[in-house]
């Protein structure tokens, strides 16, 4: 806020966003009418009366320090470090600001995102670019790094518990058998996730790459209409500025959105439409960061305290009503590869792969997940790529076998058929030439309360013993992972400890546990997996 000219509608909305209050609760907090708050969203340049200026001054003065810090970022105020000049601590010291400015001017995907934001917020063309540039000049990459470190201290269990508090009405839906996925592993404690599911969405044993992998395309035209109010547009603007400063990859590619789903044992049905990744990144994907920032600031997760969640995903009905909101998501799979006996390791087993996600990914950054894991989106065949198995094959090529041209965050060349047999890596071609070598099954389905995403948990089993000997040395994760871990399917103690690790993403743990359950049924003497019993927490 400019201390000389005072408050505007935009800075008042920034204070509301920093407090993480809805219009109604912000009005109550200030002791004013809801229509006044609404007018600030509608007219960002409006300057409130002097008495209202004093009310806003008082609210900011009484706000906790974390709120003041968030307000300073949202309002675009620079924050000089104690004992240092702004020049000494500014964002340009390590070249980050210059890189961000270059991307702002040269990156076609950022340009597309700016155009979309102008459209969504009903701004004049170029407004989003000016707003993002204004914030870029005041963002310090070290502040973002500090926040990332604070976010890392919020673990999977805390996120699941917080969402359980926010959506505490699952049991109040008469006749509903939906609830959060939980499981007991061996003799250990029960783990609870944020994945909303139901009994007939679990243990699907559905073979993919067959007719039973049956999502259909409802239309090939991307969504067009979306309206952002002042607070939502402000959050989206801040997201773009932080994306540029942190060097996060943001690519505006087509993305499948779930319209309806019909999942049962042995089969997947339903329909999807087409949306744009930027639309998701500037709306639903903001919910994860908002929640984690609230937890780091000790703000309780409940309706009224998380404005973006209140707007986009306010209750269980909105979570389940996938056709009435943007429901993006993807497929992720526990990968198990048969290994021969070894004098050093012991008997025949499966090697199980787990990744730690890098800090450059859009969601679940720096958390444990199974691999492969990817958004469900088309490459070139919008209708044929609706199959979940198609996404998993693409992600195997990209995340396990090192193919760069299936990674849509890397520009060109663009093949007419990226999964044509002539373009496949040698490991993938060998697997597809001999279908008996590989089993791909969907093991469960759920809706993740974190961002409302759909999650198809799956299992990939490579049965051929010589595959690991021939190609294990070529398996190398891409930029989406910061590290890979391997576990033996015979090491029950390590698997039980891994299941209890709070570093998991919720969807990653869901897929891991469902994959282990299925592997224990089909793995024979290669497995010694602790007993896993799921439950639905309502």
Image: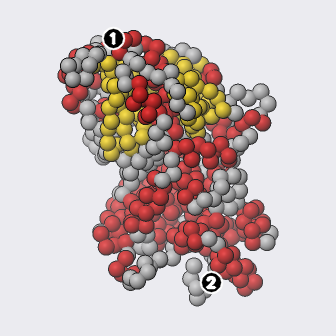
Task: Answer left or right for 84 relative to 43.
Answer: left
| Cα distance in 3D space between marks 2 and 1 | 71 Å
Quadrant of the rendering where the N terminus is positioned:
bottom right
Question: Vertically, is 376 above or below 236?
Answer: above
Find numbered disc 2 in the image and state the secondary structure of the residue it sits on.
Answer: loop
Extreme residue in the front direction: 187
Q: Position of residue 399 (x, y in %)?
A: 32, 36
Extreme residue in the bottom direction: 4
Question: Vertically, is 308 above or below 410?
Answer: below
Q: Residues within 10 Å of mark 2 (few under 14, many from 20)?
A: some
**Residue denoted by label 2:** 6
Find numbered disc 1 in the image and state the secondary structure of the residue it sits on.
Answer: helix
Q: Position of residue 512 (x, y in %)?
A: 46, 30
Q: Residues within 10 Å of mark 1 (few under 14, many from 20)?
A: few
Identify the residue shown where x is 51% and y is 73%. Answer: 76
Which dot marks residue 436? 1
Foreground: disc 2 or disc 1: 1
Task: Using the rendered view, name the quadrant where residue 460 is placed.
Answer: top left
Q: Tell which of 373 and 98 is nearer to you.
A: 373
Task: Using the rendered view, name the quadrant where residue 322 is placed.
Answer: top right
């Amino acid at each position: 806020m400019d201390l000389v000219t005072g408050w505007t509608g935009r800075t008042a909305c920034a204070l509301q966003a920093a407090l993480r209050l809805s219009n109604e609760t912000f009005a109550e907090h200030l002791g004013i009418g809801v229509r006044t708050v609404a007018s600030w969203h509608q007219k960002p340049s409006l300057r409130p009366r002097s008495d209202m200026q004093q009310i806003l001054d008082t609210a900011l003065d009484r706000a906790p320090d974390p709120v003041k810090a968030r307000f300073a970022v949202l309002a675009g105020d620079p924050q000089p470090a104690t004992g240092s000049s702004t020049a000494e601590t500014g964002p340009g010291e390590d070249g980050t600001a210059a890189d961000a400015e270059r991307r702002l001017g040269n990156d076609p995907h950022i340009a597309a995102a700016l155009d979309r934001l102008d459209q969504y917020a009903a701004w004049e063309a170029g407004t989003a670019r000016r707003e993002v540039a204004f914030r870029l000049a005041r963002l310090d990459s070290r502040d973002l790094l500090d926040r990332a470190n604070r976010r890392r201290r919020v673990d999977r269990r805390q996120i699941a518990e917080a969402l359980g508090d926010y959506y505490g009405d699952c049991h109040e839906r008469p006749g509903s058998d939906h609830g959060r996925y939980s499981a007991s592993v061996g003799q250990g404690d029960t783990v609870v996730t944020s994945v909303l599911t139901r009994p007939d969405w679990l243990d699907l044993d559905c073979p993919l790459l067959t007719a039973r992998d049956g999502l259909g395309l409802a239309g090939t035209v991307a969504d067009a209409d979306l309206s952002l109010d002042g607070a939502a547009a402000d959050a989206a603007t801040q997201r773009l500025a932080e994306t540029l400063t942190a060097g996060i990859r943001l690519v505006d590619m087509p993305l499948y959105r779930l319209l309806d789903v019909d999942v049962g044992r042995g089969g997947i049905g339903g329909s999807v439409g087409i949306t744009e990744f930027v639309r998701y990144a500037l709306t639903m994907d903001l919910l994860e960061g908002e929640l984690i920032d609230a937890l780091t600031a000790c703000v309780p997760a409940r309706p009224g305290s998380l404005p973006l969640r209140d707007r986009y995903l306010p209750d269980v009905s909105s979570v389940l009503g996938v056709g009435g909101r943007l429901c993006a998501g993807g497929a992720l799979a526990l990968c198990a590869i048969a290994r021969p006996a070894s004098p050093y390791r012991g008997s025949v087993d499966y090697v199980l792969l787990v990744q730690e996600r890098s800090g450059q990914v859009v969601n679940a950054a720096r958390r444990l997940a199974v691999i492969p894991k990817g958004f469900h989106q088309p490459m070139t065949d919008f209708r044929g790529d609706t199959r979940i198995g198609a996404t998993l094959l693409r992600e195997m090529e990209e995340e396990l076998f090192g193919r760069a041209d299936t990674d849509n965050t890397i520009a060109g060349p663009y093949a007419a058929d990226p999964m044509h047999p002539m373009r496949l890596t040698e490991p993938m071609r060998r697997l597809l030439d001999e279908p008996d070598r590989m089993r791909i099954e969907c093991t469960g389905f759920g809706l993740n309360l974190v961002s409302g995403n759909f999650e198809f948990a799956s299992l990939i089993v490579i049965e051929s013993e010589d595959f690991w000997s021939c190609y294990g040395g070529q398996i190398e994760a891409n930029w989406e992972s910061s590290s890979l871990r391997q576990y033996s399917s015979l090491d029950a103690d390590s698997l039980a400890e891994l299941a209890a690790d709070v570093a998991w993403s919720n969807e990653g743990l869901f897929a891991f546990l469902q994959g282990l359950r299925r592997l224990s049924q089909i793995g024979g003497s290669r497995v010694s997996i602790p007993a896993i019993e799921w439950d639905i927490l309502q």
